[in-house]
Amino acid sequence: MSETYCGKHCSECAFAEQLNCPGCKTDGYSPMAAQCAIATCCRGRGHEHCETCTSHTYCPTLNKKSANPEAILQKQADLQRKKQAEAEAAARKRAELLETAAVMGKWVRLIFWLMIATTAIGLFEKVRSLSVPVALITFALSAAGGVIYLTRLSAVDDGFRLASLRSFTAAASALLALFAADGSTLHTLLTLALLLPSLVSMYYEINTFAEMLEDADRELSEKWRKLWKTYKICMGVTFSSLVLAILAPGLAALAILGGAIGMLVASIQEYIYLYRTAQVCCYICKTN
């Protein structure tokens, strides 16, 4: 019985050492047999060697048996190069992730505290004697957030450039409170003019955070995406109240109340997700 499927003798094979080949008919699983087209063909057809096959005299696979070891070596070299390329790509991705996490961890946490401070100072908005300092502080805090998005976080992802508009429109709204009386026609028109860029910016801000977290924390990434859906529903309910105000004032009041409660809940969720995003980034930096 032949010691190989193709009829070659292992002791005469110049590639045996290079391939670290124990022989294609060794007991148990042979890696070389799995890579050899001739051995695979024989095993599949149930032959002990090629000579028992009626097609062996004109078999194109058997006729290439001399080139078969070189083909296996080439496949191994290609596989090694592929593994090396994948390892290098993984290393680059890891380095990029660490660089991104370092920037995000620092500046997203600051964004979070700026938002908390803006919300806290907003509680005194209706105090007439404090209206001017409240507007000025709100302007400064919002503008600072916009600058961070525009100059720091945009280095990580261009989506944060448009995200900065939300902070800048909030800063503009704070200044608007100083020069246009609340409820006046001018105040209403300017507020509506700032609404569209603010909504576009909110979309980019939330979805950019979601994309940035896909590899680091898939669950948190999905929560950011759901947050945008929540905001859309709340805004839809609020805008529908304008139509209901004409047809059913009672339902309009409920819609306004429901929209306001929904926006409040969504805002609280956003604060939580911002803080958790900063935590995830800091954790990546500490553990790598």
Image (cartoon, rainbow, N blue to C red):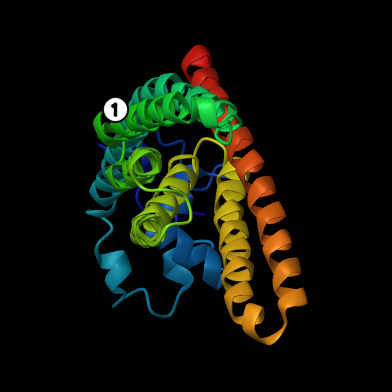
The residue tagged with tag 1: helix, strand or loop?
Answer: loop
**Quick check: can you spot residue 212?**
yes
Q: Nearer the viewer, residue 261 or 103?
A: 261
Q: Nearer the viewer, residue 204 or 176?
A: 176
What residue appears at the point 30 percent right and 48 percent down from the top-left corner? 162
Relative horizontal placement of residue 73, taking residue 266 as reference (left or right): left
**Quick check: can you spot residue 28?**
no
What residue appears at the point 59 percent right and 35 percent down from the top-left corner? 271
**Crowd rating for badge 1 (residues with CA inside 10 Å; few <14, some 14–19, many 20+):** some
Vertically, is 122 above or below 3?
above
Q: Residue furthest bottom?
A: 247
What is the quadrant of residue 53 in the picture? bottom left
Q: Position of residue 273 (x, y in %)?
A: 59, 37
Q: Position of residue 278 (x, y in %)?
A: 52, 25
Relative horizontal placement of residue 275, taking residue 179 as reference (left or right): right
Q: Nearer the viewer, residue 76 or 54?
A: 76
What residue appears at the point 62 percent right and 58 percent down from the top-left corner? 230
Residue type, label 1 = Arg
Q: Position of residue 194 (x, y in %)?
A: 35, 55
Give the number of callouts: 1
What residue appears at the point 33 percent right and 60 percent down from the top-left corner? 193
Q: Residue furthest top?
A: 286
Relative horizontal placement of residue 212, taking residue 92 as reference (left or right): right
Vertically, is 182 above or below 139?
below
Q: Position of residue 75 (x, y in %)?
A: 30, 48
Q: Nearer the viewer, residue 77 or 168?
A: 168
Q: Which residue is mark 1?
A: 152
